[in-house]
Image: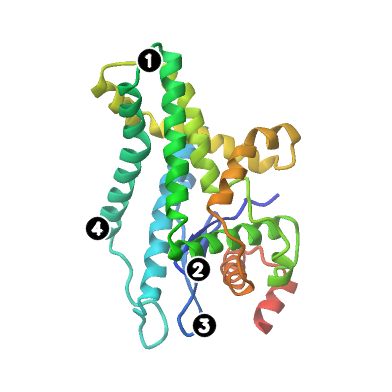
């Protein structure tokens, strides 16, 4: 099977990526779909040792976050109608702006999902390492679910969640060998085993086992361990997601990963055909750039 295609919902659009390129498609205010394509020069291809298990997950996650921020910046520019006369996006976040936004987002996530659960649990009358890491894990998951429920109440995020589902449906249809037409893609599931939401849940569960080796140190080492061990935990979670992506129909594996699929119900909403069309556009473009689009699909794309 070819290397899987991944994706991400953005403002009024979807970003799709393959091994060597990514494309973001955005529905503009005038109803037209704008596309922006970028190549990928992954360091994983240049350094063999970075492709070792767990390490490759850390690198892949970093690259995915970087691409995700760039795609969000492009969609935000289109949403603000910052276009040139030729219809192309005129501005994009500079490297400095990208690093600043990246730092703020990562800092917030660490504070909310890593530091806060550890501090809250340290205030509780919990004795023993096993009990501490389990309670901490439950607190972390509870905060995560509460966060998703809270942001799900925001009207603007409903459309982002719809595009999230449109991304899943398009990838599910592609992996099933279905023709990439909105009406056909609409029939597919809005859940996917490689979803980032599920990935975050697996990170939280794996963290329980990793932190068990740390024990229950003083508060400053407690906080430091939660931050410093995050790359290791993320690398392990990446291997779980990668394995699950290769064996999506394995009964035992699907049972084990079911909570991650259930959690996606909080970050997806049934999309419209127009939203699925945007997702398909981004997917077709990545397939074209990767040289994987079939002659029949290329013909449909030209006629559309």
Q: Is residue 228 above or below residue 278?
A: above
Q: Is residue 243 above or below residue 45?
A: above
Badge 2 element: strand
Name the residue carrying label 2.
13
- What's the residue at 71%, 49% (across, down)? 1
Q: Which quarter of the figure has residue 287?
A: bottom right
Between tags 2 and 4, which lies in front?
Answer: 2
Q: Earlier along the polypeptide chain: callout 3 or callout 1?
A: 3
Mark closest to the chain's N terminus, 1 or 2 = 2
Q: Nearer the viewer, mark 3 or mark 1?
A: 1
Residue located 46% across and 22% down the image: 134
x, y percent for residue 54: 49, 32
Neighbour tally class for label 3: few under 14, some 14-19, many 20 plus, Cα within 10 Å = few
> Mark 4 — residue?
96
Q: Which residue is mark 3?
A: 32
Work out whether residue 234 or residue 2 is closer to the camera in this orientation and state it: 234
Q: Which residue is mark 1?
A: 215
The location of residue 127, given as percent across then percent down, is: 38, 12
Report the mark closest to the observer, 4 or 3: 3
């Amino acid at each position: 099977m070819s290397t899987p295609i991944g994706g991400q919902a953005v403002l009024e659009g979807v970003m799709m990526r393959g091994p060597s390129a990514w494309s973001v498609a955005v529905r503009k205010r005038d109803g037209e779909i704008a596309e922006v394509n970028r190549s990928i020069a992954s360091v994983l291809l240049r350094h063999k040792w970075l492709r070792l298990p767990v390490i490759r997950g850390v690198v892949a996650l970093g690259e995915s976050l970087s691409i995700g921020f760039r795609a969000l910046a492009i969609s935000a520019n289109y949403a603000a109608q910052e276009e040139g006369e030729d219809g192309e996006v005129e501005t994009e976040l500079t490297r400095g702006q990208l690093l600043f936004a990246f730092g703020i987002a990562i800092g917030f996530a660490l504070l909310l999902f890593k530091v806060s659960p550890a501090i809250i649990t340290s205030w509780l009358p919990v004795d023993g390492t096993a009990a501490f890491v389990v309670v901490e894990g439950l607190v972390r998951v509870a905060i995560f679910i509460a966060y998703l429920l809270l942001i799900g109440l925001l009207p603007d995020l409903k459309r982002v969640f719809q595009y999230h589902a449109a991304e899943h449906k398009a990838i599910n249809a592609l992996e099933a060998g279905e023709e990439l037409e909105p009406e056909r893609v609409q029939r597919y599931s809005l859940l996917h085993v490689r979803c980032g939401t599920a990935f975050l849940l697996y990170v939280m569960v794996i963290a329980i086992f990793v932190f068990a080796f740390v024990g229950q140190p003083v508060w400053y080492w407690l906080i430091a361990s939660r931050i410093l061990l995050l790359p290791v935990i993320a690398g392990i979670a990446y291997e779980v997601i990668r394995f699950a992506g290769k064996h999506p129909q394995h009964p035992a594996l699907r049972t084990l990963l079911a909570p991650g699929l259930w959690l996606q119900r909080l970050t997806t909403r049934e999309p419209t055909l127009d939203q699925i069309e945007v997702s398909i556009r981004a997917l077709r473009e990545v397939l074209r750039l990767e040289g994987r689009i079939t002659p029949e699909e290329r013909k449909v794309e030209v006629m559309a």
